[in-house]
Image: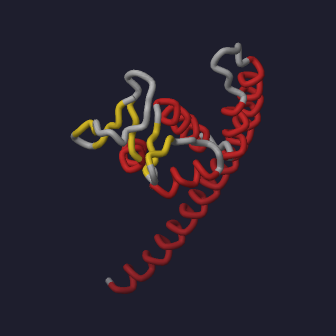
Amino acid sequence: MKLVSPGEAAANSNDIPAEAGEELVRIGEMAKKYGVTLRTLRFYEDKGLLNPKRDGSTRLYTRRDKARLKLILLGRKVGFSLRDVKQMMDLYDPSGSNTKQLRLALDKSEKQLARLQKQRALIEDAINELSNSMTVVRQMLTERAAPQASAAG
């Protein structure tokens, strides 16, 4: 396991014993790489979504943590709750077929897709209503500007 820091690989006697070749990333690097705040990473840790290794008070993220963060961010992007994301991730078994996890993910995805499609329809209706209202207002402004122009001339 290597401790990776910006511009250098730390190799001192305080390094955590590690599996061969695994790179560890500090919280700041993790936040920067994935475009999240330090607070977000700590929050995900508090919720049991991430489990970084510790070297004193320093959080060190593994390849597994990186993969989990990618899944969390993808889940949030498509509208899953953190609870849903955690339920799906917690079913992962590296030595199993993960059929239960895949079924749950598909079920939750189908329900979320239906919600998003309903939201899209509502948004499209709102856009059409607003566009129509704007057309009416523009027409009213044009009509009111025309008499003023002829009166001035």
Q: Nearer the viewer, residue 2 or 43?
A: 2
| Residue found at x 49% / y 73% | 141
Q: On the rendered structure, is 120 left or right of 134?
A: right
| Residue name at image x 30 percent, y 42 percent | 5
Query: Residue at 70% of width from left, 13% of height from top?
Result: 97
Q: Is residue 109 above or below residue 100?
A: below
Q: Position of residue 146 (x, y in %)?
A: 43, 75
Task: Give the quadrant of the N terminus.
Answer: top left
Q: Is residue 146 above or below residue 139?
A: below
In the picture as drawn, the residue positioned furthest to the front comes out as: 13
**In the displayed image of the protein, which residue is found farthest to the bottom?**
152
Q: Position of residue 36 (x, y in %)?
A: 45, 50
Is the residue 27 above or below the residue 96 in the image?
below
- Decide which of 123, 94 is in the foreground and name it: 94
Name the residue located 46 percent from the left edge and 39 percent from the top edge: 61
- Quarter that holds the C terminus: bottom left
Q: Is residue 85 left or right of residue 141?
A: right
Q: Position of residue 82 (x, y in %)?
A: 66, 46
Outermost residue on the left side: it is 7
Task: Using the image, determine if residue 122 lies above or below residue 107.
Answer: below
Would you say 87 lies left or right of 149 here?
A: right
In the rendered image, residue 117, in percent from the top left (x then y), is placed at: 69, 39
